[in-house]
Amino acid sequence: MNLLTHTGVVFGREIKPSLLSPWGLVITMVQPLVFLLLFGPLLPGDGSPWQWFVPGILVMLALFGTMASGFTLLLERGGGSLERLLVTPVSRTAMLLGRVLKEVVLLVVQAVLITLVVLPLGFELHPVGVLAGLALLAVLGVGMGALSFALAIAVRKEEGLFWAIHQTVVFPLLLLSGVLLPIDGAPGWLHTVARLNPLSYVVDAERALFRGELASASVLHGSVAVGCIAVLGLYLGTVTMRKATE
């Protein structure tokens, strides 16, 4: 079997529980929906708040959802199922890619559902821009998911250490990305720090795409940022997965 076939096997194994229990997918959408419905109407401005807020919420969904996905690997390791999988001839790279692909599929499904939820609330749909935004979100999910699995392998069976690092990284990235509040009016030092956060470029790109602005400079900058995140995540994820089985 080649890498593609191995990845398909791992993906099928990972996605099966979600297909058998789709309510888990709905439950994980509660947090972004709470932010969306209770925080969105408080945003200032004359236009619809959804056009600005929804793309940011989708990035937040990717950040929290895919960055937590490595915890499943810790559970498998604790239960011994990962060790049983490691004795099979399945490619180590495919073990990472299949898991990441499952997280990306769930992320895109959730993003589509959230977009549909806000349509009756006045969200203006630009189909091509939204599709491009979902594609960008999927690439972000690849990078974040791979980084999460790399972290899970690095901390071995220390679940507390995994969550400590997760929370330490995720919340600053979220608050400095401009998802919840505009960064433009921030003090100079805070604005500078925010521009060092690659997620802030991804959020700007998502907002431009969801407005239908495909040729915006924000889209170019966000695409570069998300590409770097994906490459870094896949590199670290692949290296740690291989080292874990040596």
Image (cartoon, helix red, strand yellow):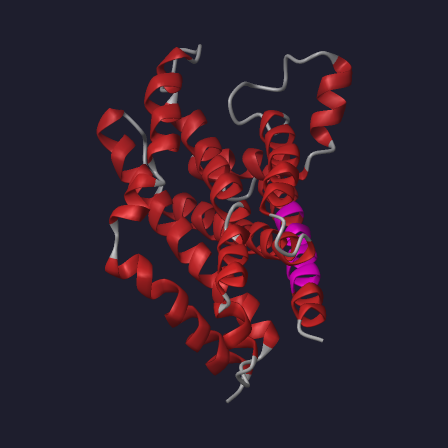
Residue 230 in which image quadrant: bottom right
Q: Residue placed at 27% from the left, 60% from the top?
A: 19
Residue 226 drawn at (x, y percent): 62, 48
Q: Identify the residue shown where x is 55% and y is 86%.
A: 89
- Lateral position of residue 183 relative to residue 66, left or right: right
Q: Nearer the viewer, residue 30 or 220?
A: 30
Residue 32: % across, % down:
39, 32
Give how far across and how far down residue 49 sits, in percent: 39, 20
**Residue 223, visible in the rendered structure:** yes
Q: Main secondary structure of the magenta part?
A: helix
Closer to the camera in the image, 96 or 75: 75
Q: Position of residue 114 (x, y in %)?
A: 32, 38
Residue at the location (47% across, 40% down)?
Answer: 209
Q: Quadrant of residue 142?
A: bottom right
199 to 120, vertically: above or below:
below
**Residue extending furthest toward the left:** 120
Q: Is residue 228 magenta?
A: yes
Please say whether residue 212 is visible from this viewpoint.
Answer: no
Q: Is residue 80 left or right of residue 234?
A: left
Quadrant of the image for the C terminus?
A: bottom right
- Residue at the spot 39% in from the left edge and 70% down from the top edge: 13
Magenta-colored span:
225-237
